[in-house]
Image: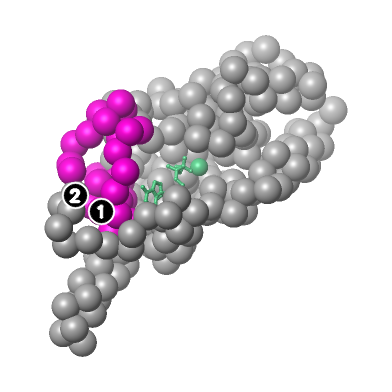
């Protein structure tokens, strides 16, 4: 099988796997991450096949949606007949990509760094605002509560357990992402998207107080 067919198959696999999710963590998130990753790769020159398959599969074993012991990515890659070395590289990238509070890992390879940057970019900007409130709604969270201050610098355990308002999520995760970007192009885009978030927060808080 050719790489192009692998990618087409991966796209179909993702569509099926995320068919029922509407919490901002759906197949379209994965496809945006895939498009962003391919864009970043134009500047970073990683292996396009590894970037494509790692980005398309980066959330198929996400612990928040699935049972990771299913090893869906591994089984899918095996069903395609992806060679062992390439398969291991993709699985390692997927493992390293996800955000785990202050325990986050930096991927070793350029392909992993690109996919992690692309995933983080999709949590920023206008899309990031939309996804956050979609997530907050799906989890019955408050938009905002001035009596609940954000908690910074949580480790993996604390971050998993923590429940708070959607506005706090901006301070607890989203605004930290810009400083965690790996690639030059990722940094450039994160800066723009972070500025957008900050102006959104400013407007939101002023409207909350009735100042505007
Ligand atoms: P991914 O694994 O794709 O990086 P997550 O599963 O952590 O993303 O989150 C999915 C989306 O929901 C992201 O846009 C993220 O910012 C948002 N989100 C995650 N946790 C919260 C939260 N506590 N409040 C609001 N939005 C959240
Ligand atoms: Ni993701």
Residue located beneath label 2 in the image = 150
Give the vertical position of 158 relative to 194 (above or below): above
Residue 24 is one of the magenta-drawn residues: no
* Residue 109 on image: x %, y %: 45, 26
Q: Looking at the image, tell me whether mark 1 or mark 2 is earlier in sequence order.
A: 2
Q: Crowdedness of circle 2 by 10 Å Cα count: few (<14), some, many (20+)?
A: some
Q: Residue at x 53, y 52 (%)?
A: 23
Q: Position of residue 77 (x, y in %)?
A: 71, 23
Assess disc 1: are there few (<14), some (14-19) or many (≥20) residues with their C-alpha within 10 Å of its C-alpha: many
Tell me if I can see residue 39 in this picture. Answer: no
Relative placement, left or right, of 206 versus 124 is left
Q: Nearer the viewer, residue 35 or 127?
A: 127
Which span of residues is magenta-colored? 151-179
Q: Residue at x 23, y 79 (%)?
A: 207
Please tell me the numbered disc located at residue 168.
1
Q: Is mark 1 within 8 Å of ligand 1?
A: yes
Q: Classify 19 as above or below 157.
A: below
Where on the picture, by quarter, is residue 60? top right
* Label 2: which secondary element: loop
Task: Identify which residue is drawn at 22% across, 61% down.
Answer: 145
Q: Nearer the viewer, residue 105 or 111?
A: 105
């Amino acid at each position: 099988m050719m790489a192009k067919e692998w990618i087409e198959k991966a796209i179909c696999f993702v569509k099926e796997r995320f068919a029922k999710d509407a919490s901002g963590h759906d197949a379209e998130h994965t496809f945006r991450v895939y498009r962003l990753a391919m864009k970043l790769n134009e500047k970073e020159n990683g292996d396009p096949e590894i970037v494509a398959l790692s980005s398309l599969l980066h959330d198929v074993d996400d612990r928040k949606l699935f049972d990771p012991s299913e090893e869906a990515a591994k089984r899918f890659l095996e069903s395609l007949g992806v060679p062992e070395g390439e398969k291991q590289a993709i699985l390692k990238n997927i493992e390293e990509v996800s955000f785990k509070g202050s325990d986050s890992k930096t991927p070793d390879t350029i392909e992993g760094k690109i996919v992690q940057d692309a995933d983080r970019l999709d949590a920023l900007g206008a899309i990031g605002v939309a996804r956050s409130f979609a997530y907050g709604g799906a989890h019955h969270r408050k938009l905002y509560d001035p009596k609940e201050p954000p908690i910074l610098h949580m480790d993996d355990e604390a971050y998993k357990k923590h429940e708070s308002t959607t506005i706090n999520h901006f301070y607890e995760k989203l605004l930290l992402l810009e400083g965690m970007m790996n690639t030059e192009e990722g940094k450039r885009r994160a800066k723009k998207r972070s500025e957008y978030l900050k102006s959104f927060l400013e407007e939101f808080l002023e409207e909350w107080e009735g100042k505007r």
